[in-house]
Amino acid sequence: MAAVLFWVFSCVSIGAVLAMILSRHPAHAALWLVLAFASLGGLFGLLAAPFVAVVQIIIYAGAIMVLFLFVLMTIDAKAGIPGEKRTFALAAAIVLALLLLAEIGLAARSLLLAPAAAVSDSIKTAAIGRLLFEKYLYPFEITSLLIMAALVGAVALVKKKDGA
Amino acid sequence: MIPAGWFFAVAAILFGLGVTAFFVRRDLPTQFLAVEIMLNAANLAFLALAKPASAAAAQTIVLFIITVAAAEAAVGLAVILVVFRRRKSVRSEDLRILKG
């Protein structure tokens, strides 16, 4: 059962990312990515991380991608149609990606060839909460500062200057 | 049980596809989406390779990564909006100021 789910989720996520690369409209690309992130959430669930899986689906596939679509609606989506020099860029990008894949595979070949036993039993959400508010309390608070800074920064960037 | 190496392989493929997408697509929003793919592939690798003893810590750190990604998305989208307002275009080929 878990193996079937693994193949379904990984094939859907990789296929959705491929469709995102091939789709010409940025909004379609974003919608494909929602599917990819949702199935990635399924993979997280298979890795015995149910809380992260739910966060992935609600925050990533939900909130962040909707923000993306929201911004895409305000800009001229037709501006994103690819140019003429696409074949060269495509070939270069594929070569680069294959090189990168080979490099990652080489670096982690012991891991790929002799796979470790997969994750143990599911982590309780309470354990994550405990870590978050005890061991990682300072990072947690700093993260809230970061979000505040990002919020203020985004508003300051987009705000129209007076008289301009 | 599924070996952790398989999850890692999926993460590596997704990362490679993200790199490909970044270089193939020529509009800022889609390139930004490609960066998000790479971030998610890194998350998957992080969760897949965590030792069972530190799995809870790995999940906590992935939560931090998602939070930082949300902040990055907010600022990045604001930058894209400003670029579009100034140039009426989001194609990265149209942004040539740095080329001199």
Image (cartoon, coloured by chain):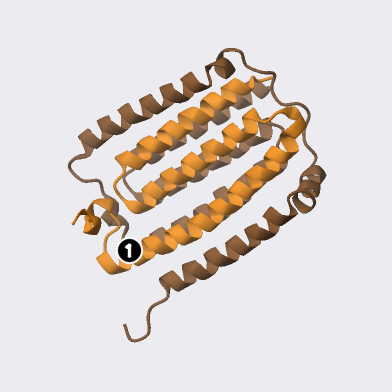
Chain colours: A brown, B orange
How many numbered marks are there? 1
Instruction: Please state the horizontal and vertical placement of residue A33, each as a whole percent of the image.
Output: 47, 43
Q: Is residue B45 above or below residue A77?
A: above
Q: Residue furthest top?
A: A114
The C terminus of chain B sits in image quarter: bottom left
Q: Is residue B88 above or below residue A116?
A: below
Instruction: Please state the horizontal and vertical placement of residue A131, each as a whole percent of the image.
Output: 77, 46
Position of A27 with respect to B10 (left or right) is: left
Local secondary structure at mark 1: helix
- Amino acid type, label 1: Val
Q: Residue at x 53, y 40 (%)?
A: B40
Position of A17 with respect to B2 (left or right) is: left
Q: Residue at x 60, y 53 (%)?
A: B67
Position of A77 with respect to B100 (left or right) is: right
Disc 1 residue crowd, few under 14, some 14–19, many 20+, Cα 10 Å: some
User: Picture quarter containing residue A147?
Assistant: bottom right
Q: Is residue A59 above or below residue A107?
A: below
Examine the rendering and report whether any part of residue A73 can be seen: no
- Residue named by callout 1: B83
User: Picture quarter containing residue B45?
Assistant: top right
Q: Nearer the viewer, residue B97 or A33?
A: B97
Tag 1 subunit = B
User: Picture quarter containing residue A137?
Assistant: bottom right
Q: Residue at x 25, y 46 (%)?
A: A82
Examine the rendering and report whether any part of residue A51 can be seen: yes
Q: Residue at x 21, y 34 (%)?
A: A88
Instruction: Please state the horizontal and vertical placement of residue B44, each as a whole percent of the image.
Output: 58, 35
Instruction: Please state the horizontal and vertical placement of residue B62, each as a whole percent of the image.
Output: 63, 43
The N terminus of chain B sits in image quarter: top right
Position of A112 with respect to B92 (left or right) is: right
